[in-house]
Amino acid sequence: MNATDSLESALADLEALRASGRSALAQAQDSAALEAARVEHLGLKQGRLKTAQERLKSLEPAARRDYGRAFNEVKAELEQALEDARNRLAHATVQVEPVDVTLPGIRPRIGRLHPLTLTMTELKNIFGRLGFSVAQGPEVEDVWHNFEALNIPESHPARDPLDNFYLAAGAGIGQRAMLRSQTSTVQIRVMEKQPPPVRVIAIGRVYRPDTVDATHSFMFHQIEGLMVERGATMADLKSVLSLFAQAYLGTEVKIRFRPSFFPFTEPSVEVDMLWHGKARWVEMGGAGMVDPNVLRAVGYDPEEVSGFAFGLGVERLCMRRYGIDDIRLFYQNDVGFLRQF
Ligand code: DAH
């Protein structure tokens, strides 16, 4: 360019720049193409607009005003076109990935109740219909409630430290503390608090240092039952337990009592159940008439009232019911297993 550059040709070039810039910016289909069009036309270092601006100097001073006005127009127009193109692409990106409302949604994973929870709820319902209310006791117990009041003396092998989880001296509850080894503790706690008649069940965790295998766990659940009133007999015990067994496992279930021994009942029995079509009786727990020593320990008069008690394994009942053959499945949080209930 030199000072003889003509206004006409400069304006014509400006027109060409306007057309080229407009179409390049308007046709860019993605941000890379738009950026290329921007650099070519509006780039600050070597863009065509920049070159056109510098051309001003090569024009006659008289022509500069007209050229300058035309230049400003084109510049403003291309800047607007750039902005329009940016808006168009930003808007387009949203539309490029529309939501397909016909695709299946993402199903939220809904939890469900653990089989033991289901079983415990059902046990409470059945015994509720038989007139039993639900009592609770602590899992950290003292030896009075776990042994002493249940007629289990210091010398009894059931109190062996190897068979119990004793806690460090004190453990905040005064006398020697332990994790309860049976729910029979709740019998004592209930009778200490209220006079007869009593008709309660207690369901909860118990702890014993057993080696874990398919049928043993260091923690499991028991359901305890206690009924104390004037004239309660072994016949009441048997009818309550058979009504329960039929309600829980089906009307074809049979129960049988086998003579046994527990320090807190006299006489004592083991409770067996037999399923329709099975050859073998299965032991479900223990039961008996509450020992007079136990009634005396809580201030009841054994001449006035009598009672029966029973204790059954919740896991066992649940396993029977659902055909589960390994107790460890209850505690492993295997979602594949738990999802079946
Ligand atoms: N507590 C006993 C146990 O854990 C089970 C038991 C037996 C409970 C006889 C009772 C009962 O209430 O009368 O082995």
Image (spheres, grey):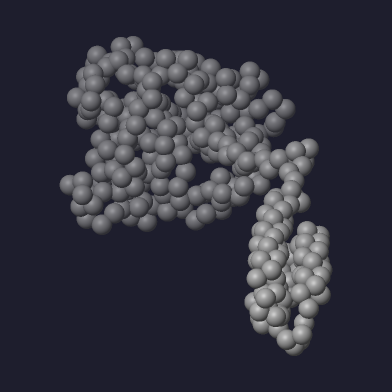
| Location of residue 191 (image quadrant) | top left
The residue located at (70%, 80%) in the rendering is 60
Q: Quadrant of the C terminus?
A: top right
Of residues 248 and 279, which is closer to you in this image?
A: 248
Q: Residue at x 29, y 54 (%)?
A: 167
- Indicate whether 227 appears above or below 47: above
Residue furthest to the left in view is 174
- Residue 210: horizontal and vertical position, in percent? 46, 53
**Residue 236 lies in quadrant:** top left
Relative to residue 183, is residue 282 drawn left or right? right
Q: State the residue lying farthest toward the bottom.
A: 2
In the rendered view, tell whether residue 211 sits above or below residue 140.
Answer: below
What residue is drawn where x is 81% and y is 70%? 12
Answer with the quarter of the image where residue 253 lies.
top right
Image location (x, y in percent) of residue 50 = 68, 77
Residue nearest the observer in this picture, 143 or 341: 341
Residue 89, image x, y percentages: 72, 56
| Viewer can see residue 38 | yes
